[in-house]
Amino acid sequence: MSVWTPLESNPDVLTKYMHKCGVTKDWVITDVMGLEPDMLEWIPKPVKSLILLFPCSETYEKHRDEEQKRLAEEELTFPKDLFYMRQFTHNACGTVALIHSVANNRDIMLGDGILKDFLEMAKDMTPEERGKALETDKAVRESHQALAQEGQTMADPNEEVYHHFIALVNKDDTLYELDGRKSFPIKHGATNDATFLEDAARVCKEFMARDPQELRFTVLALSAAAN
């Protein structure tokens, strides 16, 4: 497994990274300051994804293992065009979350560049093949590494990282949790364009409720740029 430098949960850095990869400047990453309805109102609309950064605590890992065992026994079906990829590259979760957020929203326009090239190459691959392709994609890796150095803290690729990024998206009126460390996407029930933000915020609250003593959660939104 290759090791990248972890991305910081800095909206300015992540927005710059997203634009460098080819996303038009109509879209930005912004902080979510609170998950209650009155706080969600402050986020520019539309919101296309929530990105959650959370600690990989023992409680979380236990829940993840139990969830995977339970779902492995079910007959899971997903939309054919749901773009999901595994994460095999250590510390690449920020890039994987951004890819999941952009790839599953058709109205986010992509100019020529790194991300458009990767998605075109990976469109017919399995989630595992996509993860391996990311691991060997020099252009994506170099862009990730360059932006990882622009955060407010010194990033060390060899330092143990206990936090993990995931993306929450609306695909065909179903709320999906897309986490490259899991074997498959996680369905979190029905949603729609009008309720997506509050529905995704509810899932973020569930993560927090499982770890009530833990305060190190960060929520970001992929949203329209403010006028």
Image: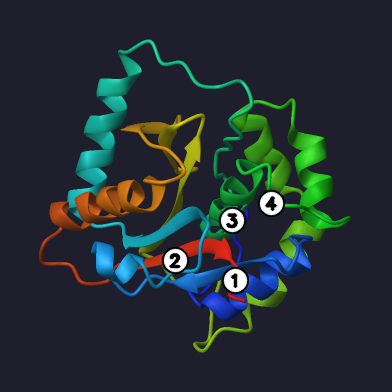
User: Which residue type carries mark 3?
Assistant: Leu
Whichever of labels 3 and 4 marks the residue nearer the N terminus, that label is 3
- Mark nearest the camera among 2 and 3 is 2
Residue drawn 78% across the image and 45% down it: 118
Q: Position of residue 178 (x, y in %)?
A: 46, 41
Rounded to the nearest whole Å, what is the CA distance between mark 3 and mark 4?
Answer: 12 Å
| Above/below status of 113 relative to 10 | above
Horizontally, is 223 left or right of 195 in the view? Answer: right
Q: Mark 1 sits on what residue? A: 14
Whichever of labels 4 and 1 marks the residue nearer the N terminus, that label is 1
SS label for mark 2: strand
Whichever of labels 2 and 4 marks the residue nearer the N terminus, that label is 4
Outermost residue on the top side: it is 75
Residue drawn 33% across the image and 61% down it: 54
Q: Mark 4 sits on what residue? A: 108
Q: Quadrant of residue 21?
A: bottom right
Q: Are marks 3 and 1 in contact (CB under 8 Å)?
A: yes
Q: Position of residue 177 (x, y in %)?
A: 41, 41
Q: Quadrant of residue 188?
A: top left
Q: Are marks 1 and 2 in contact (CB under 8 Å)?
A: yes
Q: Mark 3 sits on what residue? A: 98
Whichever of labels 2 and 3 marks the residue nearer the N terminus, that label is 3
